[in-house]
Amino acid sequence: MARRIAHEIKNPLTPIQLSAERLKRRYLPQIQQDADVFEKCIETIIHQVDVLGAIISEFSSFLPKPSFSRTDLKELAENVLLLHTQAYPFIQ
């Protein structure tokens, strides 16, 4: 679940960064006033997207890899059923 959350957080970062870079390329030459402010803002967006991407990558790398093993499905189903019959004895 945590890996999926990390992936979903990381998904919009690429379009955000690409959009910021596109804005810089397209509009920086056209800006007459405060071009340096515009460029600094764009660079801040790009840098912070990189920082977020690194944080998410580090978070994902700390998550344990899933381990797979053989499981007796009948026993698993019986345990689940037992838990539910204890929690909801009125349900047949």
Image (tube, rainbow, N blue to C red):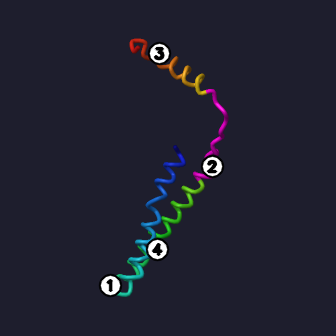
Residue 23: percent from left, percent from top:
38, 77
What range of the chain is rendered magenta?
A: 59-72
- Image side of residue 83 versus residue 71, left or right: left
Q: Is residue 70 above or below residue 50?
A: above
Q: Looking at the image, which residue is at 40% across and 71% down?
A: 19
- Does dot 2 land on a helix, a strand or a loop? helix
The residue tagged 3 is: 85
Judge whether residue 45 is colored magenta.
no
Q: Is residue 11 above or below residue 86?
A: below
Judge whether residue 61 is colored magenta.
yes
Q: Looking at the image, which residue is at 58% across and 52% down?
A: 60
Q: Looking at the image, which residue is at 47% across and 55% down?
A: 9
Identified by mark 3, the residue type is Thr
The residue tagged 2 is: 62
The residue tagged 1 is: 33
- Does dot 4 land on a helix, a strand or a loop? helix
- Does dot 1 land on a helix, a strand or a loop? loop
Choose the circle earlier in sequence order: 3 or 4: 4
Residue 89: percent from left, percent from top:
43, 12
Q: CA distance from mark 3 to mark 2?
A: 37 Å
**Residues at badges 3 and 1 in contact (C-beta under 8 Å)?**
no
Q: Which mark is residue 43?
A: 4
Identified by mark 2, the residue type is Phe
Q: CA distance from mark 2 to mark 1?
A: 46 Å
